[in-house]
Amino acid sequence: MTIIEDNLELAALLKSFFEKHGFLVNTLYSGSSGLEYVLLHQPDFVLLDLMLPEVDGFEVCRALQNKYFGKVIILTASNDDIDEITLLEMGADDFIQKPVNPRIILARFRKLLRLAQGVESKSKLDHILNVGPFKFNLLARVVSQSDIKLEMSDSEFDLFYFLASHVDSIISRDDISRQLYGREFDGLDRTIDNKIMKIRKVIGDNIPYRHLITVRGKGYIIVNSKETECC
């Protein structure tokens, strides 16, 4: 785990707590040094303060997009929904409001880990999912389309895999929000819709959609066919 936090006292407290729970922890105190370290060492988890000197959390998160493949939890004193939506779109996995409770952070990381590695608890033979032209490898956390690897962020992969694992079923935004983000869908948050648009762009799914279809007023569905089209 890497902690990027400029408050030395808080960083030390968090480091001590997570080391007691079996984590190997590195602490960095600025956005620039933290970004360099994460890109070089690719830790499993990053705990990132939003308000950092030199390079802030927004810039760090943006620079990590499609280059870092672990989990990112943001520490923030802000209650601004726009900040949260922006960072989720950049690939952040969760948020913790300051003042922080280390036990809550630990619970969130464990939840993210269960989501990412859930298939491994069944069987190593059960880590491949084929849906239409798409092949998901959950151990490697990669997806290919007609044997061509697709470039997706961690959060985009999670959403795409979640929908694909319920192939031919309509999945509501409420279900997605609860399963992936641990909260109720408020009817206004466009994070899910924006990620769907990005996934469609990556897989080349243009109107009329053939693979990832919007069902008005209900949610989304992935169709298990290479040829199916929707008007």
Image (cartoon, rainbow, N blue to C red):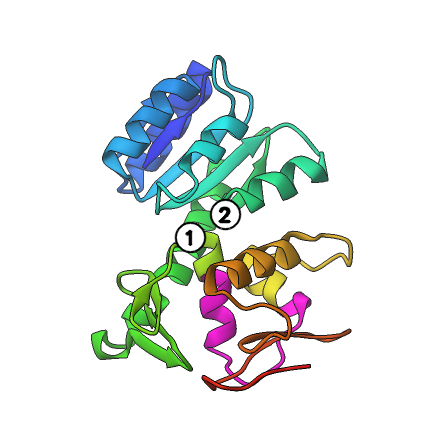
What amino acid is found at the position of numbered circle 1 in the picture? Asp
Q: Which of the two labelled residues, at mark 2 and mark 1, occupies the earlier sequence position?
A: 2
- Mark 2 and mark 1 in contact? Answer it, CB < 8 Å: yes
Q: Which stretch appears magenta? A: 158-175
The answer to whether residue 166 is visible is: yes
CA–CA distance in space, label 2 to label 1? 8 Å
Identify the mark at residue 95; answer none if there is no mark: none
Residue 42 placement: quadrant: top left
The C terminus sits in image quarter: bottom right
For the residue labelled by badge 2, is the local secondary structure a helix, a strand or a loop?
loop
Instruction: Please name whichever residue, 46 or 229, is drawn nearer the observer in this view of the structure.
Output: 229
Q: Residue at x 42, y 62 (%)?
A: 115
* Other residues around mark 2 within 10 Å, as few (<14) / some (14–19) / many (≥20): many
Q: Position of residue 10 (x, y in %)?
A: 46, 21
Residue 86 vertical position relative to residue 129 in the rendered view, above or below: above
| Disc 2: which residue | 93
Instruction: Answer whether residue 86 is magenta in the image.
Output: no
Relative to 33, 199 lies left or right: right
* Other residues around mark 1 within 10 Å, as few (<14) / some (14–19) / many (≥20): many
Q: Residue at x 36, y 67 (%)?
A: 118
| Disc 1: which residue | 154
